[in-house]
Image (cartoon, rainbow, N blue to C red):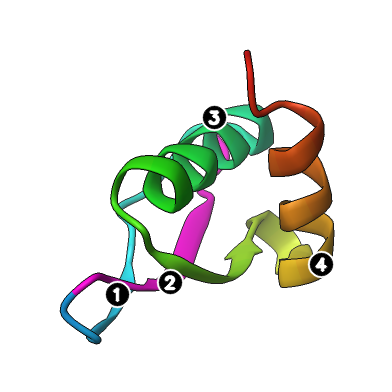
Amino acid sequence: MSNWKIYYRDQFDQDRTSGGIPSQEAALKGAKDLYQSKRAELYRIEGPDGLDLPKEEIMRWVSANKYK
């Protein structure tokens, strides 16, 4: 099982890390939810084996999927 984590800053200006997320797609959807409903600032998504999705890539995905 993969273990993905979202690194972000919440609405209270606290740095946070999400719990383990099972897939990259689920992590991107979770990041979109944090950004849209919680007004979180996204930093990056970290995946297994050192895979890292930077903020720019996450924001492109969020923008392309904002109505899904």
Q: Which mark is residue 16?
A: 1
Q: Quadrant of residue 53?
A: bottom right
Depth-wise, is mark 4 or mark 3 nearer the camera? 4
Q: Residue at x 49, y 32 (%)?
A: 22
- Of mark 4 and mark 2, the one earlier in the sequence is 2
What's under tag 1, amino acid-wise? Arg
- Residue 37 falls in which quadrant of the image? top left
Residue behind mark 2: 8
Element type at marker 2?
strand
Using the numbered discs, state the Cα–Cα distance from disc 2 to disc 3 in whole angstroms: 16 Å
Magenta-tinted stretch: 1-11
Query: Amino acid under label 4?
Result: Glu
The kind of secondary structure element at disc 1 is strand
Mark with earlier residue (2, 3):
2
Percent position of residue 48, x then y: 66, 56
Q: Image check: 4 left or right of 58?
A: left
- Dot 3 or dot 1, earlier in sequence: 1
